[in-house]
């Protein structure tokens, strides 16, 4: 269990300000090889809001990486999340930005899982 401060850079030629999120995160590996990460927003004295970031909010969220029986090179992924990006972003901007952000998340997750399995 840890407290994690995550930041994102500005985007769309600085139209979207940098964001920060502070979450309590639980990481666990089960006996069957399933890896899970569960998180939710938290306030922490060591992570006060920073003036140059907009504070976002993650509702309870998580990922399960479940081994596919008989196929050691495959993993089933189950993830759920809901994020409030904070600030004053028009929904059209959020809709155009968020898919690329999600794709990057899954790309980074794939790399992390491969590293953990090595």
Image (cartoon, rainbow, N blue to C red):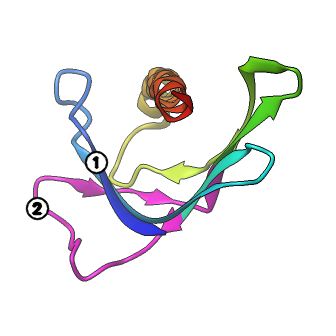
What is the span of residues highlighted in magenta in the rendered image?
40-62
Q: Which residue is mark 1?
A: 19
Check if mark 2's residue and mark 1's residue have beta carbons within 8 Å: no
Q: Position of residue 98 (x, y in %)?
A: 48, 29
Secondary structure at numbered mark 1: strand
Residue 70, located in which quarter of the rendered image?
Answer: top right
Q: Which residue is mark 2?
A: 51
Residue for point 22% across, 43% down: 18
- Sequence order check: which comes first, mark 2 or mark 1? 1
> In this view of the protein, which residue sits in the foreground, 117 or 101?
117
Membership of 49 in magenta stretch: yes
Query: In the displayed structure, does residue 103 sit left or right of residue 7?
Result: right
Residue that lies at the very extreme toward the left in this rendered image: 51
Query: In the displayed structure, does residue 59 sit left or right of residue 9?
Result: right
> In this view of the protein, which residue sits in the foreground, 105 or 1?
1
Membership of 1 in magenta stretch: no
Residue for point 37% across, 42% down: 89
Residue that lies at the very extreme toward the bottom in this rendered image: 45
- The main secondary structure of the magenta stretch is loop
> In this view of the protein, which residue sits in the foreground, 95 or 67?
67
């Amino acid at each position: 269990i840890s407290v994690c401060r995550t930041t994102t850079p500005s985007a769309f030629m600085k139209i979207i300000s940098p964001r920060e999120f502070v979450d309590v995160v639980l990481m666990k590996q089960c006996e069957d090889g399933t890896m899970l990460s569960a998180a939710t927003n938290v306030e922490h004295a060591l992570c006060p809001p920073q003036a140059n970031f907009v504070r976002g909010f993650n509702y309870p969220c998580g990922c399960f990486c479940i081994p596919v029986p008989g196929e050691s090179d495959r993993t089933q992924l189950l993830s759920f999340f809901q994020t409030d990006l904070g600030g004053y972003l028009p929904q059209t901007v959020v809709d155009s930005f968020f898919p690329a952000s999600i794709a990057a998340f899954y790309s980074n997750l794939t790399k992390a899982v491969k590293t953990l399995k090595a």
